[in-house]
């Protein structure tokens, strides 16, 4: 026991009246260990409670993040007190310095506050699909300063939290499980409209993800300048990969159009040339050549 006591009382650093002993380091390591164990137990308890309900998984993660940050702040305060630094005195003495740092790191603090808002408000959760700056992103992680997302090109994107809280963001996961999407189709004049609408509906329903015939709507939108304009409206749960779904539907439509001799037009314009009756002999008539 005497050897252990002497080891714990061994002075590692001595600066003036301040002395750092081995037992102080042991207490600090003990704080870290106890904090890790407490967070581990809290995490197990929270996620075990909601593991069967995937809808609450994002809420559980946000709650755990808030608890984790609070516990680490408390632990850090105890560590400072252990090594002899009074937290209250430190805050009061560094007030002016903190103001200067705050001005220099204004955007960083903005992101931090935004992170606290996201985690507490829980309007954005893990697994949500957002449209930010015309990019579709699936949220993988919400941190205190930044969030991590994955776009449709399988590229991981680090998003400052202030970008989510201060800009217009569309949350595709916030409504019902199914979301409505549309595909615009143009066909040549002279095509059989009823046949076209039948083909569009059949092509859409060939996808395994789209099985409810009542949720598929084919609309004759307009008489265009060079085409008859149609629109397919359908519901799908495959929100994140919907562009691939649309591409597969377009391939089926094109194949069926080819089988039924239905043409997809390209823009064209006819210009008629008229001779100027007032033009003298030998002058070039007013007009331009036909463009198509």
Image (cartoon, rainbow, N blue to C red):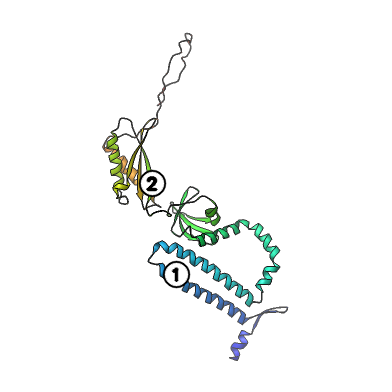
Residue 19's image quarter?
bottom right
Q: How many marks?
A: 2
Residue at image point 65% right, 57% down: 104
Q: Would you say 221 lies left or right of 160 here?
A: left
Of 251 and 222, nearer the camera is 222
Disc 1 + disc 2, Cβ < 8 Å: no
Residue 265 on image: x %, y %: 36, 33
**The C terminus lies in quadrant:** top left
Residue wearing tag 2: 181
Residue 158 on image: x %, y %: 51, 56
The answer to whether residue 169 is above or below residue 196 is below
Residue wearing tag 1: 46
Of labels 1 and 2, earlier in sequence is: 1
Task: Assess disc 2: are there few (<14), some (14-19) or many (≥20) residues with their C-alpha within 10 Å of its C-alpha.
Answer: some
Residue at image point 46% right, 57% down: 139
Work out how far the residue at label 1 is from the one at label 2, CA to CA, in angstroms: 36 Å
**The N terminus lies in quadrant:** bottom right
Residue at image point 56% right, 70% down: 72
Residue 205 on image: x %, y %: 29, 47
- Secondary structure of residue under mark 1: helix
Residue at image point 69% right, 63% down: 97
Task: Assess disc 1: are there few (<14), some (14-19) or many (≥20) residues with their C-alpha within 10 Å of its C-alpha.
Answer: some
The answer to whether residue 143 is above or below residue 211 is below
In the image, farthest residue toward the right = 16
């Amino acid at each position: 026991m005497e050897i252990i006591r002497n080891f714990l009382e061994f002075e590692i650093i001595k600066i003036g009246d301040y002395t750092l002993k081995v037992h102080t380091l042991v207490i600090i390591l003990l704080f870290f260990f106890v904090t890790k164990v407490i967070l581990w137990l809290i995490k197990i308890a929270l996620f075990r409670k909601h593991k069967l309900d995937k809808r609450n998984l994002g809420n559980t993660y946000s709650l755990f993040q808030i608890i984790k940050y609070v516990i680490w702040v408390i632990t850090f305060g105890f560590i400072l007190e252990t090594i002899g630094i009074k937290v209250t005195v430190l805050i009061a003495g560094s007030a002016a310095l903190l103001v200067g740092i705050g001005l220099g790191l204004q955007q960083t603090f903005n992101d931090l506050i935004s992170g606290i808002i996201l985690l507490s408000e829980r309007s954005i959760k893990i697994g949500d699909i957002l449209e930010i700056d015309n990019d579709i992103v699936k949220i993988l992680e919400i941190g205190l300063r930044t969030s991590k997302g994955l776009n449709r090109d399988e590229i991981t994107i680090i998003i400052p939290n202030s970008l989510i809280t201060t800009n217009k963001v569309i949350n595709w996961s916030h409504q019902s499980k199914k979301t409505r999407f549309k595909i615009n189709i143009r066909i040549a004049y002279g095509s059989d409209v009823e046949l076209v609408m039948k083909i569009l509906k059949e092509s859409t329903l060939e996808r395994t993800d789209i099985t409810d015939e009542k949720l598929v709507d084919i609309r004759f939108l307009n008489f265009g300048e060079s085409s008859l304009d149609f629109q397919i409206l359908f519901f799908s749960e495959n929100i994140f990969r919907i562009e691939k779904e649309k591409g597969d539907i377009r391939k089926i439509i094109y194949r069926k159009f080819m089988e039924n001799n239905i043409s997809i037009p390209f823009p064209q314009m006819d210009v008629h040339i008229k001779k100027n009756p007032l033009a003298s002999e030998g002058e070039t008539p007013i007009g331009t050549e036909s463009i198509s």
